[in-house]
Image (tube, helix red, strand yellow):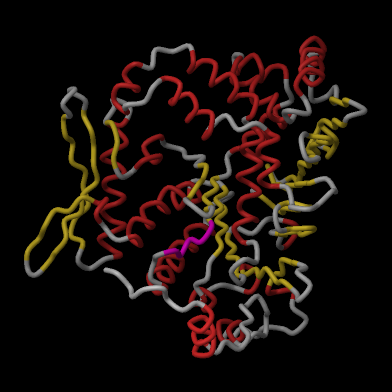
Amino acid sequence: MISFIKLNNFKSFKNVEFDLRGKKGIPKKIAFIYGENGSGKTNLMDSLFFLHNSFNTLMNINLLTNIENKDLSNVIEENKYSKDDLISFIKKIANRPLDELLAENKMIGSKDPMQIEIGFYLNKKEGRYLVEFNDLKVIKESLFFTIRERIGEMFSISEKSINLNDSVFVDRKYKNELVENVEKYWGKHTFMSILFNERKIKNKEYINEKLNPNLIRTMKLLNRCTVICKNNYSQKGYFAIPYSFLSNLKEGIFTKKFKKELPVFEHFLNIFFTQLYSDIKKVFYKIMVTEDNKERYELYLSKEMYNQVIDIPFKLESTGTQKLLEVVPAIISSLLGESVFIDEIDNGIHDQLMFEIVNLFKESLLDTETGQFIATTHNTLLLKQLEPENIYLIVTDSFGNKEIQNLSDYSFRTQRNNNIQNKYLNGDYFGLPTVGYLDFTEMIEDLSTSLKPEKEFSV
């Protein structure tokens, strides 16, 4: 579970902490983050997405090399790409070098280093991972967690020193190999990226024998967060999903691996959507054979329309209904004990429907041992059912300074019988848009006077 996120000079955050620790330092299992448009909600989620990408920079180089050496004729023919175009596309979406990631994520105009620190809670012990960058590369990296029952420094690397704890890197020969890799790759890649690449290119059992088990567990935890966030053009995300079929519930190629998973998730989706929508009578998959004799699956709905039931491809459904399908893997992952972070979970979904889903979902989540669900939202209806400790606000003052506040930390006490939604909308907690006076009539008159049309509108 993630216990805190500290950001320095990351996108719009100069210095901010998102603290999820509750009683006795145990992270909260559910939290919703509010704030006006442009306050940084997406940037907060994006920090975890950036971190995941930084773990993969070295591994992606090897992946791209393998792809370049493969026969891609089937893919090229099916998608009408040239091989060079396909490799260029893969480089663009997968093989992101660290300096390019930093150019997109480091605070504009800041000359100070960008720093991300992630606190985590694993096996009832606290730990933290810190990484620091200048404009082009890593300049500092460290990990603290349990070593032989006590919290200690597992590794600490800077431009001046390499410290790998002997109790963590137990094989001296392999430790020397890692030091050589640090001297060769570190800077353009993080040490975490080096370790993940080691697990990819070498036998996992061999690596597990050479490293302290708590380091392996920490790597898995930090890389298994599901993150769904958006940018100006599209939605992006990383799903640490427990079942491969969840990666594309809508449609895809039907493989032998999916024969067991498809009917199980078909049953899940049928219950989920028929209980949420009165006009949806059934959810099911159709299996179709393509021209090249491959089997494809596609999700369908049986909907009642004007006294008759019609089968409709799910891809033709509304934006809100399709958004719900995108959220399903995240819900399943969190209920299976994973940490999930979703930006604008309510986008396109009716406020009341989202209210009912969260109301039913949060009770099941609280029953899990390690499940965690964190989301940004504008849905103020949720404030009626959430406890103050599960509500966070990104507050921006008139000078542009940002702070992430927990509702339970406010100096005045929010009584249980008070309406949190009303108090938020009244501005008691801040985090609301502040709009000045706009005289649209005067503005349009000024516009029309200054820019007289050269000719009449054409159709």
Q: Nearer the viewer, residue 374 or 426?
A: 426
Up/down of 122 relative to 28, above or below: above
Q: Residue furthest left?
A: 308
Q: Position of residue 337 (x, y in %)?
A: 53, 46
Q: Position of residue 170 (x, y in %)?
A: 79, 18
Picture quarter containing residue 327?
bottom left
In reply to whether residue 428 is colored magenta, the answer given is no
Q: Nearer the viewer, residue 248 or 264?
A: 248
Side of 140 where 285 appears, left or right: left
Q: Nearer the viewer, residue 40 or 286?
A: 40
Q: Position of residue 131 (x, y in %)?
A: 78, 40
Image point (72%, 69%), residue name: 405
Up/down of 107 relative to 84, above or below: below
Q: Residue furthest right?
A: 160
Q: Residue furthest top?
A: 173
Image quarter in which the C terminus is found = bottom left
Image point (70%, 24%), residue name: 194
Side of 270 where 367 appears, left or right: right
Query: Would residue 418 be visible to someone looking at this image?
Result: no
Q: Residue furthest front?
A: 454
Up/down of 345 relative to 106, above or below: below
In reply to whether residue 345 is colored magenta, the answer given is yes
Side of 183 where 458 appears, left or right: left
Image point (79%, 46%), residue name: 115
Up/down of 245 relative to 43, above or below: above
Image point (62%, 78%), residue name: 432
Give the residues in magenta. 343-347
Q: Position of residue 111 (x, y in %)?
A: 84, 48
* Count of numbered tags: 0
Q: Magenta span: helix, strand or loop, mainly?
A: loop
Query: Would residue 348 be visible to someone looking at this image?
Result: yes
